[in-house]
Amino acid sequence: MWTVPPFPILAFGGVADTVTTMGIGVWTPLKRFSAAGVIVATVGAGTACAAPGKDAALVEPVMDESATEVDLLNTEVLIPPVLDFAVDGQTITLTDGAYDEGDPDPFRNNTYAYHIEPLYADLDGDMDLDAAAILHHSMYERGYQYLIVWLWEDDELVQVDRTMSGVCTVDTLNPRDSGVELTLTSVAARESCYALGADETLNETVTVSVVDGNLVQSEPVFGAVDRCHPLYWQELVTLDSAVTPRTAPDRTAPAVAEPGDDVAIHLLAAPHRTDTSEWHIAQVVVDGVTACGWVHNDEIPASG
């Protein structure tokens, strides 16, 4: 028991969702009550109060759903690069969720249409709904399915200029508390799925989120959104040196693992092909679960 002050005391962070007030001033972990038995809880911009003997439900932050009012079926969309990250993406304008380039040559005509129309989830944890969709590109017999992500920023939807490289097909896209969950088939980043058999691709379920503006895989383990399932001509080469795989081919991107972490890093190498790329995709095995990450040339020991 403690001396009752003559004024209410704020209940600080960490209070349970619902608390029951009491008629005497008592101290309990994580919360304080005033002598009058009134708990005053400030959560975000809201305040909840209750009289003695009543239950006080704390005011939860309200999700901003403004993004749902934007017409994403009729809008400009950036098509981010998936094969050569050094080139700029292409911008197209969707009409009723589709785009047709209109080339009279059917072997060259490019079309785009939503494979999965936009849905909404809080991708970056800021209590604003963001948007995600799967856009299918087709040119004759070839195609690609792009994860398109928009963030709600400054009262508008802003598209993230990254997508997932190495995706063959996306079967489902569902909102989750921490992002969007995809079930998909994949190969290695920057590789084509054209003419591959089902036994040459990997079936995966991953959750994609945005962390500090970076598109990342958040589940089942943190990593790059780009995929790292080797094709038949690619070999896994274990890197014994201290390297820092990152979530994107960018030195400022978040690290998937740091030197000294208890992980195994396997580079996807192509011994019979000339690769002049600055960045290379790798498998990063954390606690028996494989994530993907990008390793810079400078960190790869010279062979021979």
Image (cartoon, rainbow, N blue to C red):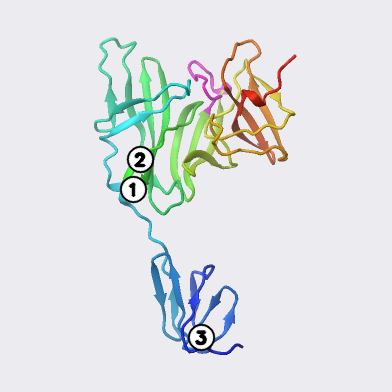
Q: Is residue 192 magenta?
A: yes
**Chain-order first, disc 2 or disc 3:** 3
- Residue 32: mark in rendering: none
Q: Is 240 colored magenta in this rendering?
A: no
Asked which secondary structure carries label 3, the reply is: loop
Secondary element type, mark 2 = strand
Dot 1: within a 10 Å radius of its alpha carbon, few (fewer than 14), some, or many (20 or more) residues? few
Q: Which of 178 and 214 is in front in this view?
A: 214
Going from the N terminus, do you reach mark 3 or mark 1 first? 3
Name the front one of labels 3 and 1. Answer: 1
Residue 26 in percent (x, y) is at 57, 85
Q: What residue type is labelled 1?
A: Asp
For the magenta stretch, what is the residue range? 186-200
Residue 77, given in percent of the width and then of the height, sits at 33, 31
Report the residue marked by disc 1. Answer: 154
Q: Is mark 1 on a helix, strand or loop?
A: loop
Which residue is found at the position 59% from the left and 19% from the top? 231
How many neighbours does mark 3 have within 10 angstroms: few (below 14), some (14-19), or many (20 or more)? some
251 or 198: nearer the viewer? 251
